[in-house]
Image: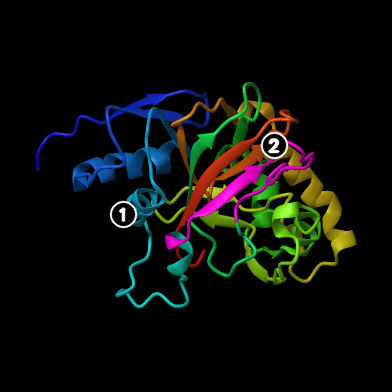
Amino acid sequence: MGECSVTVRKVGGYIGAEIGNVDISKDLSDLEIETIRNALAQHGVIFFRNQDLSGERQSAFGSRFRLADKEDGTESVDFSLEAKVIMIEKEEQQLKNVGGGWHADQTFNRVPPWGSILAAKVIPSAGGDTVFSSLGAAYDDLSDGLKTQLDGMRAVHNNERVITSMMKLPQYEGQTLKVVKANHPAVIRHPISGRKILFVNRGYTTNFEGWTEEESAPLLQYLFQKSERPEYQVRLHWEKGTVAFWDNLQVLHYAVNDYHGERRSMQRISVAGVPLE
């Protein structure tokens, strides 16, 4: 099978690892991909330094990690999402940024992406970090009674509030953004590790299925606060050439907005997932 020189160094107590000795702009071996995939499933978010990724090479790298295959009969997985390179930018004159609140990406879709890959292209002189938090660690810390209560419950995810906020940004002026809703289990099993994970987030989860928003609010607020605790977090200080790859099924993230007057430009792709159980 050959040897793999990829290194994995844990950087946080519950979450995060730095991957070394690999150039992800190149064609990697199956063993290298497997090592990176396992590190991602174990640590939730992984970081690469000193990378030079074009949009095309970033898409090619991400496509090696999809959980579903076009030929396996998986229904309604949108593979076009992962081929699309999206620039996440904030200009010098902007005050509001994209992603400046705790969330997981696109959980309002019936099949949310498994992964997100973000490459730093232009970074401010200081600030602009991203913070990640482990939903797996948050679930593990719940009481047995609350775990039993959540088992079998489903939560509603809706992008309407975020669309309202995004439409105030200049880069979305004149665009039509579609309101999308989906229901997912409140607790999922990770498709690789089998680990139980709390699957709600402040950005998109509005209520529990069969419950009103008013009835849902106290429990959701408790779960949001639990999942955002500092001990479950790791903070990434970006440098040009840094790439972050996070497991969107078990990690929340928050783009810190503390660099007003400077430009920040990041290149993102998504990695296709599978229906959640």
Q: Residue furthest left?
A: 1
| Kind of residue at badge 2 | Glu
Q: Nearer the viewer, residue 38 or 256?
A: 256
Q: How is the image coloured?
A: rainbow
Q: Tell me residue 243's x, y (percent).
A: 45, 36
Up the image or down, 91 lies above or below 115; here it is above
> Which is nearer the N-term, disc 1 or disc 2?
1
Q: Which residue is mark 1?
A: 64
Q: The N terminus is located in which quarter?
A: top left
The reply to whether residue 90 is in sight is yes
- Quarter of the figure with residue 151: bottom right
Up the image or down, 160 lies above or below 59; here it is below
| Residue range corresponding to the magenta coloring | 83-105
Q: Residue at 26% across / 31% down in the picture?
A: 6
- Magenta region includes residue 43: no
Q: Tell me residue 201's x, y (percent).
A: 69, 50
Q: Secondary structure at mark 2?
A: loop
